[in-house]
Image (cartoon, rainbow, N blue to C red):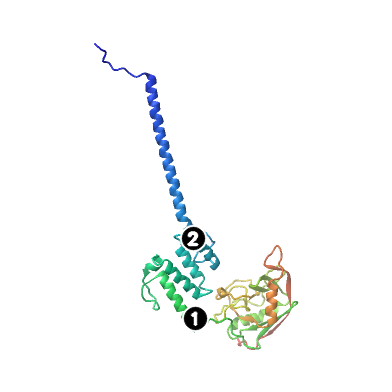
Amino acid sequence: MPDSTPSLPSLDTVLDQVKSRKNLILGILVVIAIVVFATNFVLKQMRATRYEPWRNLLLSTNNPPWRATKEDAATILEKVSGTSAEPLAAYFEALRSFNDDHVAAFRKLDALRQKFPDHYLWKVTFPSNSLLLPEPLSAGDRVMREIGIYGTWSEQHPAPESNPAPPQGNTVTLITDAGTIVLGMYVDQSPRSCAAFAKTAVQLKDRLITRVLQDKWVEIGQDEVGTAMTVEGIEADFPPYEINQLSHFRGSVAFNQRPFATTPFKGDLRVWLDTEFEQDGNSTVFATVINEEGGNLLKEISARERSTDRPGVLKSPVKIVEVRVEMPGLPPK
C-alpha cells in the first residue's frame, strides 16, 4: 500500500515562508506609510495654498488691514489679487482711502461690487437702527450709502482749512538768536490756557528750541539735551483742558504736556508744522504762529542737523533771548 501520511515541510522551508510573509507585511506597511505621508503632505500644501492669501491679508503689516495705512492697504491688495481674499482686501483698501478722497473711496467700492456681486459683502443684509438708513442693508451697501450721505453733507458744509484769526493785539513774541516768532493768542476761545501761558511764558527766556520732528512739529522750552522746562508758580490744573472750536492746524500751538498730568508740570510748547486732527482732544490749542518769518523759521529749524545719539534733538539748539507778553483781551479772573 502506498504511504498516505502527508510529508511535513522541512524547517528551512517553513522559515522561508515566514520570512516571505514578514517581508510582504513590512512592504505593505511601508507602502501605507508612504501613502499616508504623501497624503498629509499634499493636504498640508493645499491648506497652505488656501490660507496664504488670508495670511497676507491679516499678517502682512504691523496693523490689521482695517487699521493699515492707505499705502499698506494697497500693498496687501496687490499681494492677494486674484485670490479668495481679494474682495475683503479691496474693501479695506477703499475704506483706508476715505480720509483723503471720499469720492475715490465710493468709486472703489462700486467697482468692487460690480466685480464681486455675489460676495457676502453685498449679499448678506443686516437690520438697521439708524434713522438715516432705516432699511436692512449689506455691509458694503451701508458703507456706500454712508459715504454718499457724508459727501452731500461735506459739500454743504465744507471743512475749514485753518483756525480763525486770533483777536488782534494779543500776542506773545519769542525773540530767538535765529529770528522772531510771534504767537497770536486765542484769549476768547482758550482763556484758561492763555492765562496759564501768561504766567509761564516769561520762563521761556534763556530756554532752547531743542526737540523737533522735521515738517511735523517743533518743541519750545527745553535744555540742550531736550529736557522740558519745569514751570514755577503753578500749583494745579496745568495745563488746562478746554473744549473749543480750534483744531491742530499747521501753526497751532499747545502745551506739550497732556492735560490732567501730575507734577512736575512741564511748560514747553509744541508748534505743529502740519495739520494733525488726530491731536484734537489730546491737547488744547490756545495760540497760533501769526508772522511769516516765524512760520518759515520753525520749518527751517525742524530740518536742521540732529545729534547722532539723540535723533529728535538738534545738534545746535536755538536760544530764546527775550519774551514779550501782550494779552489785554484776557478776561479778568
- In the image, residue 15 sits, relative to residue 330, either above or below, namely above
Q: SS of the residue at dot 2? A: helix
Q: Relative to 4, does residue 120 appear above or below in the rendering?
A: below
Mark closer to the observer (2, 1): 2
Q: Where is residue 84 drawn, in percent x and y?
A: 44, 60
Q: Are marks 2 and 1 in contact (CB under 8 Å)?
A: no
Residue 80, numbered label: 2
Q: In this figure, which residue is indicated by the disc labeled 1?
A: 154
Number of residues whose C-alpha sits closer than 10 Å to that of mark 1, classed few (under 14), some (14–19) or many (20 or more): few
| Sequence-earlier tag: 2 or 1 | 2
Q: Quadrant of the N terminus?
A: top left
Q: Residue furthest top?
A: 1
Question: For the point 42% across and 66% down, which residue is it?
Answer: 116
Q: Quadrant of residue 290?
A: bottom right
- Measured as percent of width and height from the top left, residue 203 is found at 70, 77
153 with respect to 249 (left or right): left
Q: Quadrant of residue 277?
A: bottom right
